[in-house]
Image (cartoon, grey):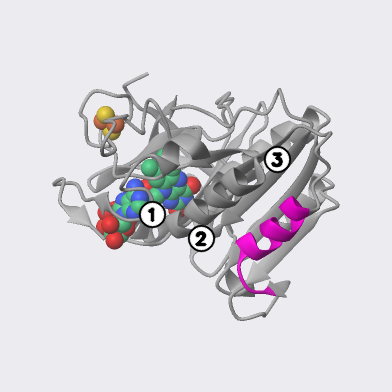
Amino acid sequence: MSMPIVLKVSAIRKDSKNVKTYVFQHDLRAKPGQFVMVWMPGVDEVPMSIGWQTNTEFHISIADVGECTHAIHEQIKVGDRLGIRGPYGTSFEFADYDYIIGVGGGCGTPPILNLVQQAVKAGKKVTVIQGARSKDYLLFKDLFNELGIPDLKCTTDDGSEGTKGVSTDILKEMLEKLDKSKKTCVYTCGPEIMMVKVAQLCEEYGVDCQVSLERYMKCGFGICGQCCMDDSGIRLCKDGPVISGKLALQHPEFGKYHRDQAGVVIK
Ligand SMILES: Cc1cc2nc3c(=O)[nH]c(=O)nc-3n(C[C@H](O)[C@H](O)[C@H](O)COP(=O)(O)OP(=O)(O)OC[C@H]3O[C@@H](n4cnc5c(N)ncnc54)[C@H](O)[C@@H]3O)c2cc1C
Ligand code: FES
């Protein structure tokens, strides 16, 4: 689908210090890790992952970081409409695994929530590790609880909730003790520096890993070339955003730089 459908916002929830969640009554049928292009009329169109999803509604959780996301935070109220294109992109694949470990950081947590929701429904064993600057930035504790995740581990940089430190410290401990008879995959979305470490740990311990990458996107479905990664040229809107950790580590820009809308490198 390349034309947006216009959907009414049925509810808005403030989920953390800088994240608001927007609820739409629509059966989107996205796979976990897929994204939509959200059009704020008169401002811009931005990629957003699907978070919580049922067959009657879906949620997107938006961090207020720049022009478009700020306009949505400030101007969109319950009953207003936003344009939605998608879902687009590759997804987190979990059917072949017994044990799912989700590692979310900041506003990278929505696709992990969606993955966990679908993996729990499929009867998989699931652990979630969520890292944030402080307890004010942790997301979806209520929704993870509603899913009955017995193993929700949190880390904060300042120790205000959970373990003081970073999520990869906990992941390393878990990988050291992992039951190798269970087919395990680690799934991650968040700051790229965190995802590099997750992918490297998975390589070190011989565990499969899938990462969801963010790049500046325009078309969202593989036409404009805006989201190509050096050096392979894979388009992250179509060949991603979810790729294997192994493949991500082969790209010189992974964890080092990305490009702005003019293609200029930003480190
Ligand atoms: C597949 C995908 C899924 C995403 N899912 C979510 C989500 O669920 N929740 C969420 O809050 N955000 C998500 N993002 C990031 C979101 O698209 C950007 O934050 C948004 O486009 C910023 O738009 P803006 O106009 O507000 O900011 P701008 O004014 O364009 O930029 C503000 C700052 O954000 C940086 N920025 C802009 N776009 C991106 C980007 N794509 N990736 C990284 N940094 C960027 C800019 O370099 C600048 O520093 C996702 C991005 C992708 C590619
Ligand atoms: S955003 Fe156009 S090719 Fe990816």
Picture coordinates of residue 144 (x, y %)?
75, 50
Q: The residue tagged with tag 2: helix, strand or loop?
A: strand
| Residue 30 versus residue 174 in the image, above or below | above
Q: Nearer the viewer, mark 3 or mark 1?
A: 1
| Residue 127 versus residue 73 in the image, above or below | above
**The residue under label 3 is which amino acid type?**
Val
Residue assigned mark 1: 255
Quadrant of the drawing holding the C terminus: bottom left
- Quarter of the rendering containing residue 222: top left
For disc 3, the neighbor class at 10 Å (few under 14, some 14 to 19, many from 20) is many
Q: The residue tagged with tag 3: helix, strand or loop?
A: helix
The span from disc 3 to disc 1 (Cα, nearest Å) is 25 Å
Residue assigned mark 2: 19
Q: Magenta stretch: dominant SS?
A: helix
**The residue under label 2 is which amino acid type?**
Val
The span from disc 1 to disc 2 (Cα, nearest Å) is 23 Å
Q: Is residue 126 left or right of residue 222?
A: right
User: Which badge, 2 or 3, comes first in the chain's sequence?
Assistant: 2
**In the rendered structure, does residue 61 fall within the stretch colored magenta?**
no
Q: The residue tagged with tag 1: helix, strand or loop?
A: loop
| Residue 66 versus residue 79 in the image, above or below | below
Picture coordinates of residue 29 (x, y %)?
58, 23
User: Which badge, 1 or 2, comes first in the chain's sequence?
Assistant: 2
Residue assigned mark 3: 116
Picture coordinates of residue 183 (x, y %)?
76, 32
Q: Is mark 2 within 8 Å of ligand 1?
A: yes
Picture coordinates of residue 115 (x, y %)?
65, 37
